[in-house]
Amino acid sequence: QLVESGGGLVQAGESLRLSCVASGRTFRGYVMAWFRQAPGNQREFVAAISWIGGTTYYTRAVRGRFSASREITKNTLYLQMNTLKPEDAALYYCAAGSPEFRYNDYDPTDFDSWGQGTQVTVSS
């Protein structure tokens, strides 16, 4: 089970930190990811992190502004989002799966466990 939190309403240029608590199984060897979906759009990849090594990869649109991390002892995944833009507004999901880690955008079908999402709204 994955449960996200931390979403909210911020102004452009501000920051938010999303959290995702994972439970119910071990995620050793898994890739964890963040996706987002704005109304009328497909779910799109944001960031991925390998659970054990902490290796990260970001989609181009957020590179340099977002940072993914995890705290293994707390089974928690984080997404630090800085310098938020109105186009970052979306429902953000965390996901877990067992694809090989790669330096390329992931597809939602690569992941088999999903949270319920947390809403991020950015006003201009």
Image: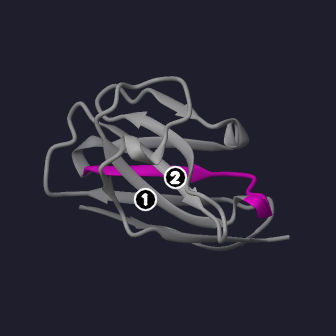
What x and y, as percent, mark residue 85?
78, 58
Depicted 106 relative to depicted 9: above or below: above
Left or right: residue 60 compared with residue 79: right
Depicted 80 relative to depicted 103: above or below: below
**Which residue is drawn at the image coordinates 78% and 64% (left, top)?**
86
| Furthest residue in direction left, as rendered | 25
User: How many numbered discs?
Assistant: 2
Amino acid under disc 1:
Ser
What x and y, as percent, mark residue 23?
19, 57
- Scheme of colours in the image: one colour
Q: Quadrant of residue 124?
A: bottom right
Q: Looking at the image, which is closer to me, 41 or 20?
A: 41
Name the residue carrying label 2.
35
Mark 2 / mark 1, whichever is N-terminal: 1
- Membership of 29 in magenta stretch: no
**Which residue is drawn at the image coordinates 20% and 35% (left, top)?**
28
Secondary element at tag 2: strand
| Furthest residue in direction right, as rendered | 124
Q: Residues within 10 Å of mark 1 (few under 14, many from 20)?
A: many
Of badges 2 and 1, the one in the foreground is: 2
Depicted 111 relative to depicted 29: above or below: below
**Which residue is drawn at the image coordinates 55% and 46% (left, top)?**
45
Name the residue carrying label 1.
19
Query: Magenta segment, which residues?
Result: 75-87
In the rendered image, which quarter contains the N terminus?
A: bottom left
Q: Quadrant of residue 104?
A: top right
